[in-house]
Image: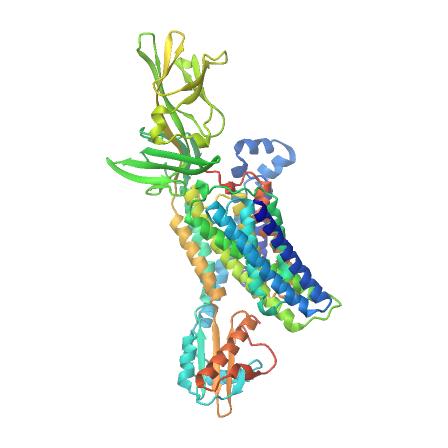
């Protein structure tokens, strides 16, 4: 048991586990992944032979759910937890503000690396303490003629904070994985949308689909030189009779509870009426037919007898709201299953086309938006994990713990120090601090005159 | 790019290349004045580079962040600026020779992609873009300095060569400090990118190739810090690790978008 504990808390184990996780991440990029290439492409790649063995049987085609990866991740967290438990008490001790004993201080001053200058005239312990406080040190006396200071005393706890944040991130990730639902939908301006997904991208393993209903209005799409520079709409949620309007755009989705509605694309919807010779309406269709990219859309009419083909609109040509009633839409009308087109041209709202004895009328043109509806929980934990992690890292690596010990007698002023990291940088800080102390005491130029014994200033790194 | 911009761009690259050459010449042939000239060349090149960034900013009307060329332009600036800052006062006489070649590779690669100014697409109109990109450049700049210091350390400490222990100790500490700074800023970059991805793509993490490679790169540097602080890796071992680790940074900066069209980092939303 003891051996197992030592193995779990060993830093070599941590390094090996990190290296193995790195290897899995490398595989995630190097090997085609199902989630990245899509089901169709993945199925083609994994049809037979070695590819099937690697991608499907060994699970290398979906690293995030690969059992070996998950086992390594589990071991990593186990090792991390054990290491945190084992190192917590020593870390607390190292983070304390307890001053050294007089004997420990004497031993510290006797070590090589201390800086020494003649005692400046006008020297005062009080002003020295003040200088150290201004430089960020908390000070305390250690016997006669000695002053101890510590800066960022609790910085070693940054280690615990940073590594503990991994657990928070993991918990957030797990919650997100379990509760995430995603589906794409098309919402036509003025038409309520109530859960009709075009494609369900992912069902949530835990819990039901979100109950959402909304309408969109004021759809705007603009492009410059063929690049989409703006896509926005007003989304009005319809829940329990209350409406809540939100202006949404790319990067600013509309939200309702744990659900998010992200605008992704836009186009024009055609309201088509098929009328007979006497003007009676045979069929009404409202179709989000005109897209801004991809293949032409096909709208079947009259029980499949006719089809209306709408080529994609150029991004730069998306009409402004005021222009919609006059917008000319390019359409091709032909019998289903091929055959010569009976119409190939542009129609404006109100225009019509003869289809044998019947008439096809383009009644209205309205914008539509393609949205991605996402519902998930756990985002707050993830953000909290990020904040804790960055705070812990900054605390530990940037604001690391530093201690100084100042001793003075009739002849000399001695400054010794130790820092958690960066001994050479810290020695420069000590030299600057000594110069400041001497200048404050009024003698001036102590930095240039400082002598020190050979060797490096002691750090916890060594 | 316009003709004048192009001339200034290539002139900047030439100045950086001359700085590298001058540092190498000064060290190899023991001519200290050449090392000083090299530092002046770095500063001069950086001044011209700053003009280029400002020019592009004014021309496009937005921070130069769109496309490989603009990212290379600003990313290269950060590498050069951090190299100049770390090497100030001639503390590290060969640092520019170690890290500026990375800036040259990135800038040269950027120049081979489409340099036409692009409008700020809808997907990039976010406050998080600036946080994400800024910390990315800080991180990559710091990693480049660490790599440069590693290269210099390896060159100075190779067998059969007498090396100044104090100089090696300074380089060793520079490697560690740059890596630590890069690691912290890299973490902020990943966090900011993840929060931004939620607003843009509806998911904090999609295992997109660029995301995964950034995480892998961060893990490698985390491993380097672990090996240094807990297992005492320093000197040549650490230097070799940092020299190889920069490959991950270059791949996540360049290679993934070039090779893998499936990356969502092409920002085609809207």
Left or right: A410 as drawn, with respect to B148: left
Q: Nearer the viewer, residue A372 or B156?
A: B156
Residue B82, picture quadrant: bottom right
Left or right: B238 as drawn, with respect to A310: right
Q: Is residue A308 visible?
A: no
Q: Is residue A400 visible?
A: yes
Residue A375, picture quadrant: top left
Quadrant of the rendering where the C terminus of chain A is positioned:
bottom right
Rendering colour mode: rainbow
x, y (%) of residue A343? Answer: 44, 14
Q: Nearer the viewer, residue A145 or A378?
A: A145
Task: Single out the residue that lies furthest toward the front.
Answer: B4
Residue A264, picture quadrant: top left
Q: Nearer the viewer, residue A6 or B89?
A: B89
At 64% from the left and 54% from the top, the residue drawn is B14
x, y (%) of residue B198? Answer: 42, 45
x, y (%) of residue A78? Answer: 50, 56
Task: Single out the residue that lies furthest toward the left.
Answer: A241
Relative height, residue A213 to residue A179 (above, below): above
Task: Single out the residue that lies furthest toward the bottom.
Answer: A410
């Amino acid at each position: 048991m003891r051996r197992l504990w030592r193995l779990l808390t060993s830093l070599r184990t941590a390094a090996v586990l990190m290296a193995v996780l790195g290897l899995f991440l490398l595989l995630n990029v190097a090997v085609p992944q199902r989630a990245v290439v899509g089901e169709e492409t993945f199925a083609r790649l994994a049809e037979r032979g070695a590819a099937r063995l690697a991608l499907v049987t060994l699970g290398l085609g979906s690293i995030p759910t690969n059992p070996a990866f998950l086992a390594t991740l589990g071991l990593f967290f186990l090792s991390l937890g054990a290491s945190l438990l084992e190192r917590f008490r020593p870390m607390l001790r190292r983070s304390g503000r307890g001053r050294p004993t007089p004997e420990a201080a004497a031993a510290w001053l006797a070590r090589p690396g201390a800086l020494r200058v003649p005692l400046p005239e006008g020297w005062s312990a009080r002003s020295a303490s003040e200088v150290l406080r201004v430089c960020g040190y908390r000070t305390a006396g250690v016997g006669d003629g000695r002053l101890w200071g510590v800066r960022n005393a609790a910085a070693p706890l940054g280690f615990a904070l940073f590594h503990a944040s991994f657990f928070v991130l993991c918990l957030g990730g797990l919650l997100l994985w379990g509760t995430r639902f995603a589906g794409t939908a098309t919402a036509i301006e003025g038409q309520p949308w109530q859960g009709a997904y075009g494609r369900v991208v992912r069902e949530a393993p835990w819990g039901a689909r979100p109950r959402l209903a909304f309408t969109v209005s004021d759809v705007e799409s603009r492009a410059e030189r063929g690049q989409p520079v703006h896509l926005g709409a007003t989304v009005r949620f319809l829940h329990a009779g209350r409406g809540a309007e939100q202006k949404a755009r790319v990067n600013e989705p509309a939200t309702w509870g744990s659900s998010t509605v992200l605008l992704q694309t836009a186009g024009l919807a055609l309201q088509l009426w098929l009328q007979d010779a006497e003007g009676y309406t045979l069929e009404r269709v409202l179709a989000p037919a005109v897209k801004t990219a991809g293949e032409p859309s096909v709208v079947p009419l009259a029980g499949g007898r006719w089809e209306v083909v709408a080529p994609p609109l150029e991004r730069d040509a998306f009409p402004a709201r005021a222009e919609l009633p006059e917008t000319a839409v390019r359409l091709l009308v032909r019998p289903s299953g091929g055959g010569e087109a009976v119409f190939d041209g542009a129609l404006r709202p109100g225009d019509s086309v003869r289809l044998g004895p019947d008439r096809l009328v383009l009644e209205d043109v309205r914008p539509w938006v393609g949205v991605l509806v996402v519902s998930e929980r756990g985002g707050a934990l993830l953000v909290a994990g990020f904040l804790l992690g960055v705070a812990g890292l900054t605390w530990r690596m940037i604001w690391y713990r530093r201690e100084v010990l100042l001793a003075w007698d009739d002849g000399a002023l001695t400054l010794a120090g130790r820092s958690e990291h960066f001994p050479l940088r810290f020695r420069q800080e000590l030299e600057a601090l000594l110069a400041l102390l001497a200048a404050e005491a009024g003698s001036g130029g102590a930095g240039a005159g400082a002598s020190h014994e050979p060797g490096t200033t002691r750090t916890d790194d060594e | 790019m316009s003709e004048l911009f192009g001339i200034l761009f290539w002139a900047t690259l030439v100045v950086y290349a001359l700085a590298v050459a001058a540092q190498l010449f000064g060290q190899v042939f023991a001519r200290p004045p050449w090392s000083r000239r090299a530092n002046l060349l770095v500063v001069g090149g950086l001044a011209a580079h700053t003009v280029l960034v400002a020019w592009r900013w004014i021309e496009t009307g937005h921070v130069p962040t769109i496309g490989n060329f603009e990212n290379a332009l600003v990313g290269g600036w950060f590498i050069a600026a951090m190299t100049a800052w770390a090497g100030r006062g001639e503390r590290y006489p060969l640092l520019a020779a170690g890290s500026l070649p990375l800036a040259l590779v990135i800038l040269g690669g950027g120049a081979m992609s489409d340099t036409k100014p692009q409008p700020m697409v809808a997907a990039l109109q976010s406050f998080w873009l600036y946080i994400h990109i800024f910390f990315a450049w800080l991180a990559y700049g710091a990693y480049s300095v660490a790599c440069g210091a590693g290269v210099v350390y390896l060159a100075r400490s190779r067998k059969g060569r007498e090396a100044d222990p104090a100089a090696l100790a300074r380089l060793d500490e520079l490697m560690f400090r740059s890596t630590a700074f890069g690691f912290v800023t890299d973490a902020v970059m990943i966090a900011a990118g993840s929060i931004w991805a939620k607003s843009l793509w509806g998911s904090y993490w999609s295992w997109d190739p660029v995301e995964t490679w950034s995480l892998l790169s961060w893990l490698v540097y985390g491993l380097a810090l672990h090996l240094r602080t807990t297992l005492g890796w320093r000197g040549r071992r650490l230097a070799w690790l940092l020299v190889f680790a920069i490959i991950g940074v270059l791949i996540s900066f360049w290679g993934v978008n070039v090779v893998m069209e499936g990356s969502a980092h092409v920002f085609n939303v809207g």
